Image (cartoon, rainbow, N blue to C red):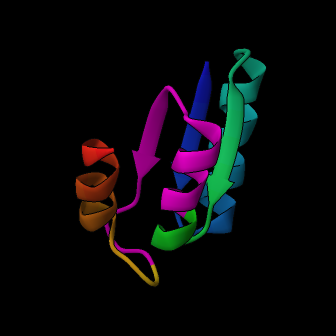
Amino acid sequence: MRILIADDDADLVEGLRWYLEAEGYEIIAAGDGEAAIEACRKQQPDLVILDVMMPKMDGIRVCEIISRE
């Protein structure tokens, strides 16, 4: 299972990555909303964990866009 973690807090992303990879998940990381959309289009994750307040585009808008694709 592939999981996209979209958050601008690098420490939080790395902590989640560490735990989830230990459970066997493949992790994709994005540091802002635009990168999250691009990662969804290219990598097609099974699950997306979105921060609400990110640079360039907030998580709510990202969710609206990726849910339509």
- Residue placed at 29% from the left, 53% from the top? 63
- Residue placed at 66% from the left, 53% from the top? 29
Residue 22, percent from left and from top: 77, 21
Q: In which quadrant is the C terminus drawn?
A: top left
| Residue toward you, 28 or 37 | 37
Residue 18, placed above or below residue 14: above
Residue 24, percent from left and from top: 74, 15
- Residue placed at 40% from the left, 53% from the top? 50
Range covered by the magenta-colored residues: 36-54
Residue 43, placed above or below residue 13: above
Q: In which quadrant is the N terminus drawn?
A: top right
Residue 57, percent from left and from top: 38, 77
Residue 52, placed above or below residue 6: below
Q: In the image, 13: left or right of 60?
A: right
Residue 53 is one of the magenta-drawn residues: yes
Which of the 4 image quarters holds residue 64?
bottom left
- Residue placed at 44% from the left, 44% from the top? 49
Residue 14, placed above or below residue 35: above
Furthest residue toward bottom: 56
Residue 20, percent from left and from top: 66, 28
Residue 8 is one of the magenta-drawn residues: no
Q: In the image, 42: left or right of 63?
A: right
| Residue toward you, 45 or 21 | 45
Question: How many numbered discs sit on the rendered protein?
Answer: 0
